[in-house]
Image: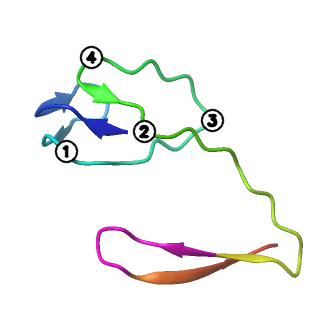
């Protein structure tokens, strides 16, 4: 999600500034309002026992390995 302009979310009680991005975690039904833009839709990536994914935090640049069960 990306904020088109400054707004306060009534459900989560969070304030967003224009241009900020965030990820909505689910599963849940979400109907975006006029103040947000859907940038990308993602699906879950199931991992096998010997698989993993590198995940980068866009806020601080930290990269970590997420392993399967």
Q: Residue 26 magenta-drawn?
A: no
**Mark 2 touching mark 3, by CB under 8 A?**
no
Q: Dots 2 and 4: beta carbons under 8 Å?
A: no
Residue 9 at x, y = what percent?
23, 29
**Mark 1 falls on what kind of element?**
loop
The residue indicated by pointer 2 is: 39
Query: How many residues crowd mark 3 within 10 Å: few (<14), some (14–19), many (20+)?
Result: few
Camera-nearest label, 1 or 3: 1
Task: Say which residue label 3 marks.
Answer: 27
Q: Which residue is mark 4?
A: 34
Numbered tag placed on residue 1 in the rendering: none
Magenta stretch, residue numbers: 54-61
Q: Say which quadrant the C terminus sits in.
A: bottom right
Q: Who's the residue at 35% across and 79% down the image? A: 61
Q: Main secondary structure of the magenta part?
A: loop
Pick whichever of labels 1 and 3 is earlier in the sequence.
1
Mark toward the start of the polypeptide (2 vs 3): 3
Residue pictured at 80% horizontal, 58% vertical: 46
For the residues labelled 1 and 2, the Cα–Cα distance comes to 12 Å
Residue that lies at the very extreme toward the front in this rendered image: 39
Q: Residue at x 56, y 22 (%)?
A: 29
The residue at which mark 1 appears reads as 19
> Marks 4 and 3: which is nearer the front?
4
Whether residue 44 sits left or right of residue 28 in the image: it is right
First in sequence: mark 4 or mark 3? 3
Q: Is 48 located above or below residue 45 in the figure?
A: below
Q: Are marks 1 and 3 in contact (CB under 8 Å)?
A: no
Sequence-wise first label, 2 or 4: 4
Closer to the eye: label 2 or 3: 2
């Amino acid at each position: 999600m990306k904020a088109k302009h400054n707004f306060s979310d009534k459900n989560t009680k969070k304030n967003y500034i224009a241009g900020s991005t965030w990820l909505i975690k689910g599963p849940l039904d979400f109907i975006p309002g006029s103040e947000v833009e859907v940038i990308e839709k993602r699906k879950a990536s199931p991992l096998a026992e010997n698989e993993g994914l590198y995940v980068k935090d866009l806020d601080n640049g930290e990269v970590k390995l997420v392993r399967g069960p």
